[in-house]
Amino acid sequence: MASGDRTAKQWHSLAGLLSAGPAAPIALLGAPMAGGAVTPGECDRAPAVFRAALKRISTYDVETGQELHGQGVYDAGDVVLKGMSPEESFAPITGAFSALVASHKLSILIGGNNAVTRPGVHSIDADLKSVGLITLDAHFDLRDTSAGLLNGNPVQALLDDGLPGAHIAQIGIAPFANAAYMHETAKAEGISVYPMGECRRRGIEAVIADAFDKIAARCDRIYVDFDIDVIERGLAPGAPGARPGGMTTMDFFDAARAVGAHSKVRAVDLTEFDPACDVSDITALVAGRWFGELLAGFQTRSG
């Protein structure tokens, strides 16, 4: 058998895509932040568990015939954040991630802790006036910042930093999981809010398209926060903040593919994954499949 035939008959996993050099169009960075969580856990383990899960996800999509093998991703490793609070983590994350955003078409930040979203957005442009933010999240993340930065207030912190509310769309906000003042803040700031019920009624593809229409009309570059607790709790046990009645995993995957395909999306993150809470690697495998869907969408963008 020729060597080319042997290669064609091998199993190719998404983990194999991470061996590309810095010239690859996509970059990956881990941000294992441990501090600043409303509910203490082990979200700092998420980047390592995420990478391990990629070994179990194929590069081939049987439904579309799409093959991702050969689409390289530059794995820039993890930022050293041990013992740091969200405030202390800001400079190391922006320093590492902004360099990747500047030199790659799509940059991916694997956090675990949702507090990484603030430095992630700043990594696109410190000015924030040309940046848009779309979140897929059960929560507004609009807790008050007077007591410090947490995984429950990155959106409020970004508003405080000068990100216009009209540049933000929040998808999948869950009932009975947020305070009334947060909703009032979102409305007052001009944030586009798509509650979970609207996502079910209209369908996730229509909601994502609507959010992109609004944000892309105002912004040159878009950051997307994929908070995994937007998913139905029974389908993502490794997301401590997930609630019954959340998004299906298929809707989460469809959203990832749509996001990867959009030309104005420069960076995304995956947050609120706590491996210590996971069961039978369910959430880890959801994260791995999410990565494949994101890459599949990007592949259609790049042609």
Image (spheres, rainbow, N blue to C red):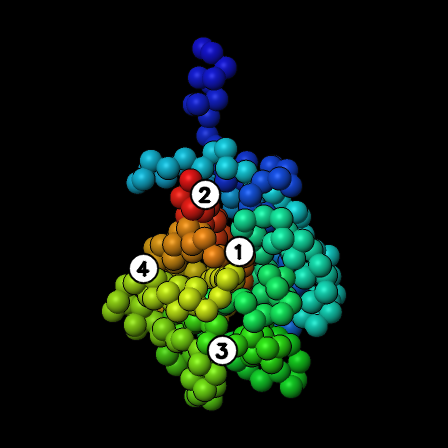
Residue 204 seen by the camera:
no
Q: CA distance from mark 1 to mark 4?
A: 20 Å
Disc 3 or 1, which lies upstream in sequence?
3
Residue labelled with disc 3: 165
Disc 4 or 2, which lies upstream in sequence?
4
Give the residue type that dot 1 points to: Arg
Foreground of the two, 175 or 294: 294
Query: Which mark is nearer the camera, 1 or 4?
Result: 1
Foreground of the two, 272 or 71: 71
Mark 2: secondary structure: helix
The numbered dot on residue 302 is: 2
Mark 1 packing: few (<14 Cα in 10 Å), some, or many (20+)? many
Question: Residue placed at 36% from the left, 73% from the top?
Answer: 194
- Quarter of the figure that contains the N terminus: top left
Mark 4: secondary structure: helix
Mark 3 packing: few (<14 Cα in 10 Å), some, or many (20+)? many
